[in-house]
């Protein structure tokens, strides 16, 4: 793009309710992940079914043998010394660097976790109501018929794998992979996180016994809760990577002010000198 070319258009891409929910949700998820890892440190083993104790068979375990940490998943053991199980002179599953509070304190972690769980639920309900009433769900998030075609999805996957991110007018709206990711979090990840969390509460089990039926027991709910949390953590990593690749200043401006500068179209073969 030469100096004589006009600058790319500045468009209003992200509405205020979306921005508010994004930042509230980002803070909430980070705190819940960190307090959740502290709570997990109290019993770093996961089970399927209604029961689970130290001598029962666990499908996932993070532990140590002396100063040697390990992660066992479905019977396959991976050494994790310095990362999990034994890290930074602690034998906790997750080291203090990634937990809240930094020192082992499960009661405080539970208080923070439950408080921000309510923030998560209220924020999700508010955003869901906004998405329905403003038609944000239909206009911006649901995939159009042509976007659902396997060939179209495969083309988008290949483009992202080559780091050919949308430019020009194509960058004005969410691309199909973004829509699938956001819908997965909004309609599957967060509801599963909330319901599985409620199932781990004896008081909620007494009030809503159908939760135990839905998840096949409290220990299965704990496993689902952990898996969904890991999925959300992976989503955050990929999301931040895409922000960096797409241009962090432009992406952050969009999520702070709502205004986004459309990246210029790639030059065609005819345009190249």
Image (tube, helix red, strand yellow):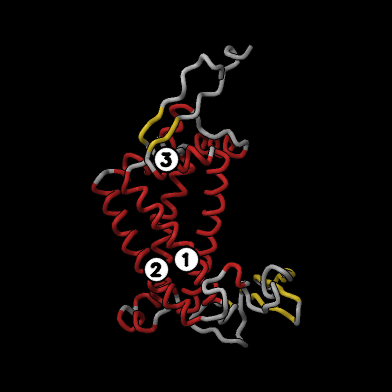
Report which residue position mark 3 lands on: 254
Residue 189 percent across, percent down from the top left: 44, 59
Residue 109 percent across, percent down from the top left: 48, 76
Report which residue position mark 2 lands on: 116
How far separated are the C-alphas under marks 1 and 2? 8 Å
Report which residue position mark 1 lands on: 31
In the rendered image, which quarter contains the N terminus?
top right
Residue 4 percent across, percent down from the top left: 51, 14
How far separated are the C-alphas under marks 1 and 3? 24 Å
> In percent of the image, x 50 and y 64: which residue is there?
229
Graded by Cα atoms within 10 Å as few (under 14), some (14 to 19) or many (20 or more), the crowding at tag 1 reads many
Q: Give residue 94's quadrant in the image.
A: bottom right
> In percent of the image, x 41 and y 61: which residue is there?
190
Tag 3 secondary structure: helix
**N-term mark: 1 or 3:** 1
Q: Is residue 131 above or below residue 30?
A: above
Q: Give residue 141's quadrant in the image.
A: top left
Q: Is residue 199 above or below residue 192?
A: below
Q: Is residue 166 above or below residue 133?
A: above
Return the residue nearer the eye: 95 or 128.
Answer: 95
Graded by Cα atoms within 10 Å as few (under 14), some (14 to 19) or many (20 or more), the crowding at tag 3 reads some
Residue 261 percent across, percent down from the top left: 44, 31
**N-term mark: 1 or 2:** 1
How far separated are the C-alphas under marks 3 and 2? 26 Å
Circle 3/circle 2 CB separation < 8 Å: no
């Amino acid at each position: 793009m030469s100096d004589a070319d006009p600058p790319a258009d500045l468009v209003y891409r992200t509405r205020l309710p979306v921005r508010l929910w994004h930042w509230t949700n980002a803070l909430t998820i980070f705190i819940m992940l960190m307090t959740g890892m502290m709570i997990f440190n109290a019993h770093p083993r996961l089970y399927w079914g209604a029961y689970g104790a130290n001598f029962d068979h666990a499908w996932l375990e993070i532990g140590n043998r002396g100063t040697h940490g390990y992660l066992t998943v479905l019977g396959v053991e991976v050494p994790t010394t310095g990362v999990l199980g034994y890290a930074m002179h602690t034998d906790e599953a997750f080291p203090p660097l990634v937990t809240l509070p930094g020192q082992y304190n499960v009661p405080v972690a539970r208080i923070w976790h439950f408080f921000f769980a309510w923030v998560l639920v209220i924020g999700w309900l508010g955003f869901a109501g906004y998405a329905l009433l403003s038609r944000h769900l239909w206009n911006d998030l649901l995939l159009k018929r042509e976007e659902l075609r396997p060939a179209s999805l495969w083309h988008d996957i290949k483009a992202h794998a080559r780091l050919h991110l949308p430019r020009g007018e194509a960058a004005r709206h969410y691309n199909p992979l973004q829509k699938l990711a956001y819908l997965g979090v909004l309609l599957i990840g967060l509801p599963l996180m909330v319901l599985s969390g409620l199932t781990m509460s004896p008081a909620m089990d007494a009030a809503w016994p159908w939760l135990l039926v839905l998840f096949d027991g409290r220990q299965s709910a704990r496993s689902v809760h952990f898996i969904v949390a890991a999925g959300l953590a992976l989503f955050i990593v990929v999301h931040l990577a895409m922000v960096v690749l797409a241009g962090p200043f432009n992406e952050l401006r969009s999520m702070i002010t709502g205004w986004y500068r459309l990246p210029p179209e790639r030059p065609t073969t005819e345009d190249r000198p």
